[in-house]
Image: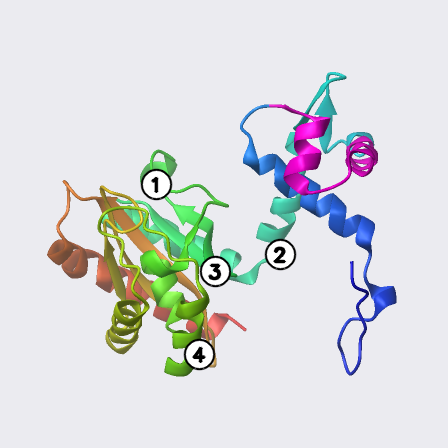
Amino acid sequence: MPKLKRENGEVRATDFVESLDRGLRLLQAFGESTAPISLSEIAREADLPRATARRILFTLQHGGFVSSDGKLFALTPQVLTLAGSYLRSNQVVAVLQPVLDRISAEALEISSLAVLDGDDVVFIARGSPMRIFTGGVDIGYRLPSFCTAVGRALLGRLDDAELKTKLASLRREPLTPQTVTDPRRLLAAITADRARGYSLVDREAEPHFRSIAVPVRRYDGTIVAAINIGTHVDRISTEEMVKRFLPLLRAGAEEVKTRLL
C-alpha cells in the first residue's frame, strides 16, 4: 500500500496504521453474508491474505467482537458498541430524535434521518408511531443517493457544477423499472428539488415505496442531513404526501436549525 504523507494537514506515512485499516476492512466484509463464514471466505471478501485474516480474526475474537466454533466465524453483539458510540456522540441524532418521534406520532408513519456517506445515504435514526419498529428502513441501512428522496435532498447542497460532476461519477444502476439513471434528468430533478425545498421520489429505490424528504440545515444554512417519511404506494398518493407530510417535515427541520453547530 502506498505510504501517506502529511504536508500542511495531510496524512504522513507514519500516521497510517495499516493493520487497523485491514481490521476494519475485515469487519465490514462480514456484511456480505447472513451466516457464519469460514476463514477462507472472510479473507476473500476482505481481499486479505489468509494468514493476515487469521491473525486479525483471533485478535477480534480476543476482544469479544468475533466468535468462532473453530471453523466458522461470526460477529458478536459487541460490534454494536462501535455503532452505538457514533450514535451517542452524533449531535444530529441527539437533536433530531425527539423531532422524528413527534413527526411519526402526528403522521402515523415512520420518519427517518439520513446522512450522505460517499455515494450512498445511511439512515442513522428513525421515529415510529407507538415506538413499534415494523417496516421501514433499519438504522445503518444504506441506499444509493441518486434514487432516494433523502439522497437528492442531500445532493442539493452541491452547486450545479459540483452536482454535474458528482452525478457523472456515480454508479447509477436501476433498482426498479422507475429508477431514473440518466445524469441529465437527475441533474434537472435535483436542482428543481433544491429550488422547491423538498424531494419526492416515487418507486425508484423500491418498487412499491415512495418517500418525501427535506434537507436539515445547521445554523449557517449548510445541509448536514435529511429527514423523510416513506409509505407504501397503495396507501398514500404523492399529492397527499405533499399535503400531509411536507409541513411536518419542514417544521421539524426548521426547529432544529439553530441547535445544530
Query: Which residue bears the numbered disc 3?
Result: 119
In the rendered image, the quadrant that contains the N terminus is bottom right
- What residue is at 23 percent from the left and 64 percent from the top? 247
Query: Which residue bears the numbered disc 4?
Result: 162
Q: Residues within 10 Å of mark 3 (few under 14, many from 20)?
A: some
Q: Secondary structure at mark 2?
A: helix
Which region of the structure is painted magenta? Answer: 36-60
**Contact flag, marks 2 and 4 (Cβ < 8 Å):** no
C-alpha gap between disc 1 and disc 2: 24 Å
C-alpha gap between disc 2 and disc 4: 30 Å
Q: Secondary structure at mark 1?
A: loop
Any mark on residue 161, and which? none
C-alpha gap between disc 3 and disc 4: 14 Å
Which amino acid, by three-letter code, is at mark 2? Ser
Query: Which residue bears the numbered disc 1?
Result: 136
Residue 74 horizontal side relative to residue 155, left or right: right
